[in-house]
Image: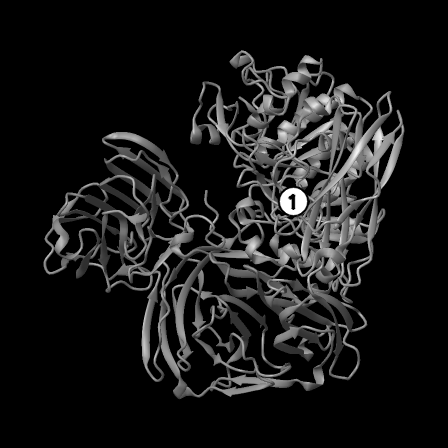
Amino acid sequence: MPDLNGLAAGSGAGVGARHRVTLVTGDRVLVDTEGRVLGLERAKGREGVPVQLREVDGHTFVIPADAARLISAGRVDKRLFDVTVLNRPATRTSQKQGLKLIVGYAGTAADARADVREAGDTKVRRTLKTLNADAVLTPGDDAAALWKAVTDTDGTTATGVAHIWLDGVRKVSLDKSVAQIGAPKAWKAGFDGKGVTIAVLDTGVDATHPDLKDQVIADKNFSTSPDTTDKFGHGTHVASIAAGTGARSKGRYKGVAPGAKLLNGKVLSDEGYGDDSGIIAGMEWAAEQGADVVNLSLGGGDTPEVDPMEAEINKLSAEKGILFAVAAGNEGDWGERTVGSPGSAAAALTVGAVDDKDRLASFSSRGPGMDGQIKPDVTAPGVAVTAAAAPGSVIEREVGQKPEGYLTISGTSMATPHVAGAAALLKQQHPKWTYAELKAALVASAKGGTYTPFEQGSGRIRVDRAIRQTVFADPVSVDFGVQEWPHTDDKPVTRKLTYKNVGTKAVTLDLAVTGINPRGKPAPAGFFKLGAKKVTVSAGGSATVGLIVRTRLGGNLNGAYSAYVTATGGGQGVRTAAAVQREEESYDVTLRMVDRDGKPAVHHMLDLTGISGLAQDEWFTPYDKDGTIELRVPEGTYIFNAGIAVDPEDYGKGTDWLSRPTLTVDRKISLTLDARRTKPVDITVPDTAAEPALAAPEFALTVGGNRYSFGWLLDTYEGFRTAHLGPKTTGGRLTQSWAGQWTRGDTAQYAAATGGRVEKLATGYTKRWKKGELATVKTGLGASSTGKTGTVLAWAQLPGSSGSPAVGVPQPLPGRRTLYLSAANGVKWTLDFEQYGAEDEQGFPVLDAYYTTGDSRIFKAGRTYAQTFNVGVFGPRIAGLHGIRRDGAHLYGLLPMFADGRGHAGASFYEKVTTTLYRDGEKFASGEDALDGSGQFKVPAGLATYRLTTSISRAADLAGASSRIDASWTFKSRKTASDTRLPVSTVRFGAPFLGLDSTAPAGRKATVRVTVQGAAAGRNLRSLSVYVSGDGKKWTEVAVKKGSFTYGTPAAGKSVSLRAEVTDKKGNRSKVTIHDAYFGR
């Protein structure tokens, strides 16, 4: 059944869904599908805490003041406040039952563990021993209690609490390949992986497949799915690449290590997603089961900080000696720094993908890592790889079996098990080797291509070489770190490169180094240099040579330089990648924070956001308890933004906002941010009885098409002060806005917004709204069932603004409310209605339904308007983007099935839905698709006649009116070149005589308007038939004249159902039936 808390289902993104995401503080943020913040619902006890809004690099952060310091200190995961991440469908699904967190402890921390467990209904889902952490689930209404348990009022974590992480979501990283890496030669040498255990942590493994029969020796489920069966099809494919026997294909599709045994750890669901904590628990289980190699063909976005997945891999590798082969990710088309986590873990053997000709796959994620490290480490075949199919799985249904029992797909997911299997062959040969030796041998023996280390690591693995490898390098790659700008006085830096010989004979190695500049061209001669041209490594011994980098030789070209050191001799070769970051032009910046009393500011929020030059999209959020912050930042222009709280134990005393929209860093800079320079903000409405409900100041700077915005969500402007720092802003477009909302009981609501383009931000601001500057909107808020509450929200849109948040006051339904909206500065308004029912699992009222006026509009001062929401007749709406659509081979519905009687688009919680597609008279597909844009039918390209039918119903305790809607559309279609609305129609019924409860006075004649929408509208109409029924069984046709018909209203408590059939002039037919369209009273 769909979860409509935030309309997560039953209202697709295309229908304009809103979602509520819960922060770790317990506050809830209302966002739209584009990630814009529409409002904030504060947790109990957190009233008055200032909340800062930041839009940076496509992500929107909502950061309460009491969390900022912890984020800057690295104690709290900033993803917990990234509503762009939290609003992703996979994250919302994962967090459906409550917030999933990982709480890390310092030492035994018995008191801290007890406090976490006793925070409301918080439950420990898993204990992660390696991390000394608990994976917890806390209902949304208990999040504030948990936040209080893990933090102190002085802005630090509670005693014994080391970290609070988001329990994030990871996903799958979607016949010649085995020979390509030399596996048959290793088999011939006697190594097939026998005695080695590979753990495949994935979507499960189909152990009934002939290639995997008897291969799986243990399995365990860590996912949200009920069992270890592979219903997605990814894990089976991966497992057979690593250790499939090839039995079904008579050996043609044999895996790399067919003699190895498998552990099936299902850490990803039947939809291909999994929580960090489940994957970590799978790693710990694999270690307990004696795994030698762990395959992780999964991942997610990386951040500069060490996340719990990376920490787990690093620790288990060091403590247990297990090799983790991890997919680099499939984001390579986005360029550099796209390697995902946990492939970003230092200890991981991170795998990119090449095709059968060793050409780097375009999708293979590139380095460097977020910390500048060389990633990936190696590559392996990952393009069009054929391996075992799990019958009936998601992937098998999508791509089909060819040949029978197998399927062919691409991704670094496919490359990774090649490496895991290769490691198993090596482990069989060298049982005492740990991850370090296995990794070193595979990296050393790789075949280089015409790519940089940040694209391919050391190259494509060659296991036939690896099994003969007796010499390898330590470290496997050399990191020189960052050499500070300027470089004219850079001194040579030397790193030691040690060659170890595990063989029985001494080996003399000829050494060479090839440098590569940031543009992929040869580095200047001498930039990288070896301390020797030749080195002899004794049997069982080691020899060290210096690798020298001279960054002074780079001229004016800064950035990531890399190199390959090759050592050849004794019939083998060793490849080692190296890298140095030649710092771009950068400077030291010192910032001194001063509070209202002239003392160093302790309680501050600070960020520096780069907008041009080398600083583009750089983001710094530093903190220092002494109020003095020292940074080193790239040359360029920044937005400087700071908030200073007067008293974090009483935020009502005020907050100071100091901003400098453009700060050019082209030299060493020292700045003082003095809160004594701020002046108060005072904004009021003409109704003295109205209480402040929301204050939302914002400024935005648009430069070169990029928009950077910063703002606050406050309860009131009282105590809020601002100051502009620095000169006028001359580059880009600077805008500033002041939005506020006030309420008076259940009857009146004020919403005002003003602002526009400025050269300087306001140092203090005063606005007294007058009655003559406001428009009046009288709203009717409907409900056709009892016990409901609802709100109406007014969103402001100023020219050049992304929109201001709104607040609603719940009131009993049905009811009325008067809005007073500002009408200056070209402001436009969008009005939304929301209906709430019982509380959900997290203790929040369930959002039953919402309706919106859609496009924003101007309301004129002094005028009175009317809007009615959530009143029948409800039914499908086809207009604009809404309709049945086709994009290439994909046919889908995108239309609000329960648009209200005034034509407002929106959505309603539905209880049941069945949708079926017929093609040329034959049933093609069927499922629970609500035609909300979330589902698609993949259909053949050729011209065909389609009939799409749907039946969607909602419970009587949600809405009595329009309890069920049946619809069908018959049309012709072929493959389209672009996303196109198809020639379908619907009929809308207008019943302005209905009351707010969707009832009509019994026993009277009433006129119902009939409107055709879509392909048959206007002159395109061939025929229209309308029917009425009192019981939904016996139907009577009525005559439609001049767009309406007259019919008697039903007796009290009885309903009328409506049906329409329409055909356009091209023969496309549509039919819609609305059961219980309205009732009599």
Residue at x 80% of width, y 35% of height? 473
- With 882 as the anchor, is 676 left or right in this view? right
Instruction: Indicate the secondary structure of the residue bearing disc 1.
Output: helix
Considering the image in quadrants, where does the C terminus appear? bottom left
- With 53 as the anchor, is 71 left or right in this view? right
- With 583 as the anchor, is 223 left or right in this view? left
Using a 10 Å C-alpha cutoff, classify the residue at mark 1 as few (fewer than 14 neighbours), some (14 to 19) or many (20 or more).
many
- Asked if residue 75 shows in the view, the reply is no
Residue at x 55% of width, y 45% of height? 331
Residue at x 68% of width, y 24% of height? 463
Q: Position of residue 970 (x, y in %)?
A: 22, 40
Residue 52, by quadrant, is bottom right
Please name the colour scheme applied to the rendered image: one colour
- Asked if residue 539 shows in the view, the reply is yes
Most foreground residue, 821 or 55: 55
State the residue position of label 1.
454
Q: Position of residue 292 (x, y in %)?
A: 74, 26
Most foreground residue, 916 or 243: 243
Q: Position of residue 370 (x, y in %)?
A: 67, 51
Image position of 65 with respect to 531: above or below: below
User: How many numbered discs sit on the rendered protein?
Assistant: 1
Most foreground residue, 739 or 109: 739
Most foreground residue, 184 or 232: 184
Residue 355, by quadrant, is top right
Amino acid type, label 1: Phe
Q: Position of residue 1073 (x, y in %)?
A: 24, 46
- With 291 as the anchor, is 394 left or right in this view? left
Image position of 475 with respect to 821: above or below: above
Image position of 957 with respect to 217: above or below: below
